[in-house]
Image (cartoon, rainbow, N blue to C red):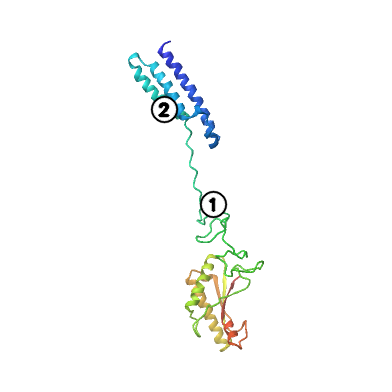
Amino acid sequence: MKKSTTGLLLGSALVVGLSGCASSASQSSGMGDSASSDRAWYQHPAVCGLAGGLIGSGIGYASSSESDEDTGAAVGGTAGATIGALLCAEPNKKAEPAPQDTDGDGVIDANDQCPGTPAGVAVDAVGCPLDSDNDGVPDYQDQCPGTPAGAEVNALGCVEDLVLRDVNFEFDSATLTMGAESILDDVADKLVANENVRVRIEGHTDAVGSDSYNEDLSQRRADSVADYLASQGVERNRMRTIGYGEAQPVASNETDAGRAENRRVELGEWE
């Protein structure tokens, strides 16, 4: 048989044999990782490379003149091994994208039922802001945490107007004390977070002094609270101030304790 005929036959064998291996390997890869790990021995790139090298050497040898037989065999073997290994190699698998957590709350987007949670807000397992008292107002917006179960609350999370405890003023003045400012900081944070809510700020006094004086003092104190909240980021047009003076006592004005209860500022929803 002539060398050219031998080369043709070996070349055909290389194409047919390696194409079959490559086809089988590709099908196995498409079936998933478990199928890929169970590939037949003859589908392994090393085996295909060895077969390709042997066939390639034969082609190179058969296709070369007598003086170039060794060179032809070497070149053919190298080319055949490379082609065989490539044909049987597993296709590159695209890397899986890293899970995204767009709002940075620790719950990936695929599991997050409350996307867009503000930064720093504590969330539950499904990415929703915590609501410890289950009143429908998240903790980070709730001005009245610990509401009894089943109680109907307003948008502030309160059953009724919130008395701003320990929000005190300097004697016979509308100037807030440092302790009062500290308490109002927390109120402001929750109002800023609850941006769709408007509030009433009501000032009240005891019965010491004239009605007109107490009404003016209570108005100035309500305004002072609103001014401080505005300085902490609460829009001024979301607040309405009212001074009731001594007109709405919650305790007796006959005792020191009762008068102290009456000197108060209340926060409520402005509907």
Q: Position of residue 32 (x, y in %)?
A: 54, 36
Q: CA distance from mark 1 to mark 2?
A: 44 Å
Answer few, some or many: residues within 10 Å of disc 1's Cα (few below 14, many 20 plus, some between 14 and 19): some
Quadrant of the image containing the C terminus: bottom right
**Label for residue 24?**
none
Say which residue label 1 marks. 109
Q: Amino acid at mark 2?
A: Thr
- Residue that appears at 55% across and 82% down: 218
Q: Position of residue 136 (x, y in %)?
A: 62, 63
Decide if residue 32 is in sight here. Answer: no
Q: Secondary structure at mark 1?
A: helix
Q: Position of residue 79 (x, y in %)?
A: 40, 25
- Residue that appears at 52% across and 34% down: 37
Q: Secondary structure at mark 2?
A: helix
User: Which callout, 1 or 2, points at the residue further toward the start of the chain?
Assistant: 2
Quadrant of the image containing the N terminus: top left
Q: Position of residue 217 (x, y in %)?
A: 53, 83
Decide if residue 230 is in sight here. Answer: yes
Q: Which quadrant of the figure has residue 205?
A: bottom right
Which residue is more in the foreground, 153 or 214?
Answer: 153
Given the current orientation, which residue lies at the most extreme left position? 67
The mark lying in front, picked from 1 and 2, is: 2
Say which residue label 2 marks. 82
Answer few, some or many: residues within 10 Å of disc 2's Cα (few below 14, many 20 plus, some between 14 and 19): some
